[in-house]
Amino acid sequence: MSWKLNNIIIIILLSYSIIPTFIDRLIWRRRFTRDREVALTFDDGPGIYTEAILDLLVKYKVTASFFVVTDNVEKYPNIVKRIIKEGHEICLHSRAHKMNIFRSYKAMDKDFIHALDELEKMGVRPKYYRPPWGVFNLDLYRLIKKYNLRKVVWNVMVGDWRKFTTPEILSRKLIRRTKGGSIICVHDAGTDHGPKNLIKALEIYLPKILAKGYRFIKIDDIYN
Ligand SMILES: [Zn+2]
């Protein structure tokens, strides 16, 4: 490939995906303004650890938002039913958790149609969408609009997916970074070690943060 062609490809990629994603990330550093109200959001599920997380949410009377991957919804429809029944919110994370940097309008549209169909079968019409890894591109913005979704990223992330972390590290980071208006992104699936550590971390974090007077709200509560 010639030097010139390489440069052109880099410029196209930068303007199609990398710069829009970067701008979005900057915007989302800002917190929504709520005094001691925070949103706890779970990505990548449902999966085999989701029910243990739901048990914890019941125990501490916490509501959350689940950004689901609909290929997992097909595998665990009963867990989705439980999420809804227990008063949490279902949002869309994607059909199959593909990286959007290089993806075309057509390919992404196909996934939206499939994903929204899958959720409709469960009686869910999601209002909020978070792309895998928070990666956007210009066509994705058009599709988000087409399907009447609102994009939601995060402003607190603690690395719960990392192999060499511990529940103590995670809970400490969660406590330190939680502020009024935080949108916390953690994962109920995707790896085995991640949700296992997270469950133990939440067992430490939730009672402590509730004792500080924080209240957990859904994404929809932010926009309503
Ligand atoms: Zn994800």
Image (spheres, helix red, strand yellow):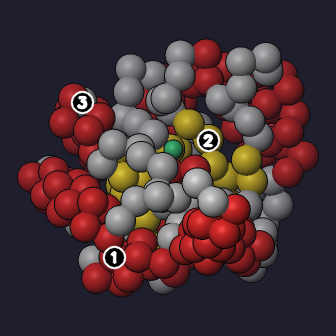
Residue appearing at x 42%, y 46% in the figure: 98
**Residue contact at pointers 3 and 1, CB within 8 angstroms:** no
The amino acid beneath tag 3 is Tyr
Q: Which mark is residue 2?
A: none
Viewed as shown, does residue 40 lie left or right of 190? right
Q: Earlier in the sequence, mark 2 or mark 1?
A: 1
**Mark 3 vs mark 1: in front:** 1
Instruction: Provide the residue designation for mark 1.
Output: 143
Q: Which residue is drawn at 27% across and 77% down?
A: 147
Q: Which of 215 and 93 is in front in this view?
A: 93
Secondary structure under tag 1 reads helix
* Marker disc for residue 76: 3
Name the foreground residue: 209 vs 223. Answer: 223
The disc, 3 or 1, on the residue closer to the chain's N-terminal end is: 3
Q: What element carries label 2?
A: strand
Quarter of image, res 153: bottom right
Image spot of residue 53 (x, y percent): 50, 30
Q: Marks 3 and 1, how far apart in space?
A: 26 Å
Q: Residue at x 85, y 26 (%)?
A: 169
Q: In this view, does 33 lie to the left or right of 20?
A: right
**Dots 3 and 2: beta carbons under 8 Å?**
no
Decide if residue 58 is in sight here: no
Q: Residue 173: x percent and y percent?
A: 85, 39
Which dot, 2 or 1, sits closer to the camera? Answer: 1
The residue positioned 13% from the left and 58% from the top of the image is 117
Q: Residues within 10 Å of mark 2 (few under 14, many from 20)?
A: many
User: Residues under labels 3 and 2: Cα distance?
Assistant: 19 Å
Instruction: Kindly identify which residue carries mark 2.
Output: 186
Q: Which of 150 and 144 is in front in this view?
A: 144
Q: Quadrant of the N terminus?
A: bottom right
Instruction: Specify the amino acid type for callout 1.
Output: Leu
* Badge 2 amino acid: Val
